[in-house]
Amino acid sequence: MAFRPALWASPPATIPEVKVSLVATVKDAGPHIEEFLDSMRAQTRAPDEVIVVDGGSTDGTFETLQRATDVTALSDPGANIAKGRNVAIRAAAHDVVAVTDADCVLAPDWLQRIVDPIERGADVSAGFYRPLGASLLQACAAAVSLPEPDELAPGWMPSARSVAFRREAFESAGAYPEWLDVGEDMYLNHRFVESGASIELCPDAVAYWRVRPTLGGTWRQYARYAEGDAVAGMYAHRHAIRFASYLVGLAALMSRRRWLAWPAALAGAAYAVRPMRRAWRRLPQGSPERRAALALVPAMMAFIDAAKMWGYLRGLAAGRRNGRSL
């Protein structure tokens, strides 16, 4: 998965139909902030303004943003992601807002493509994102969690690292929930649906997202995602299925009836097929990493599932914010 998107010189920006504010949040992005800025400047359609809210960086990220004359840099130390995004959106001058993270790298045509559905009348444009990383661990983690475009079904929910919407739809949905530290984008997505916003999938609008480079970082990330689900009352059925599946599989493996292990093994293999196929497609042909991924992806799936189960239990213990179940 050693991939880094090319930031070639862009052709002249297209004449926009609507004015667009590009907003992002960041904290301690280090050297990655320059890559984000380069990718923003290479867009085939230039944003009409760029607003980045820094949540209290101590590594020079905010100073880098302040030096960028084409960026409005705002500092809000201690703000979580939801608050940072709300601050940026409310400071934005335009009625169409494109959202990403300032440690991502944007494909050169990302903004042009993600705004196209809005110009056609959609309220929300659901962009796509691809993994950015060089190690086998990152490739396996990405294979577990990041789908391919041909896997996306109607109703697929976008990440806030690649989304655009009309301000009216954003306000009708209630903005990002500042009481929720993680999972705020999925929560807002469901509020978009509830408010009747029209959402158009736009898989060609690609932001490149940095996969965590360590097992510890991967564990914390997915545990926090699941903790946010529990706090917000989201995806209870999905988490229940995960707990039940592992409990049934563990019971089958521990049973004296050895034949029960076979159905459990077959079910586990079926569960792993799609992530293994993703890793196989993304890694270089003939590379040793490609073969190693066939064994490592199932192990990574179990590792990430364990993190999610732990995080979900933590979230339940902390108490759910509301009684919604999605």
Image (cartoon, rainbow, N blue to C red):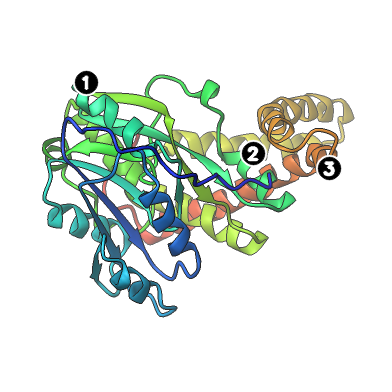
**What is the quadrant of residue 256 in the picture?**
top right
138 left or right, relative to 89: right
The CA distance from mark 3 to mark 1 is 45 Å
The CA distance from mark 2 to mark 3 is 13 Å
Which residue type does callout 3 highlight? Answer: Ala
Residue at (30, 31) in percent of width and height: 125
Badge number at residue 143: 2
19 left or right, relative to 54: left
> Dots 2 and 3: beta carbons under 8 Å?
no
Q: Earlier in the sequence, mark 3 or mark 1?
A: 1
Q: Position of residue 226 (x, y in %)?
A: 47, 49
Say whether residue 55 is visible.
no
Q: Position of residue 200 (x, y in %)?
A: 31, 24
Indicate the secondary structure of the residue bearing disc 2.
helix
Residue at (34, 73) in percent of width and height: 62
Q: Residues within 10 Å of mark 2 (few under 14, many from 20)?
A: many
167 left or right, relative to 165: left
Badge number at residue 292: 3
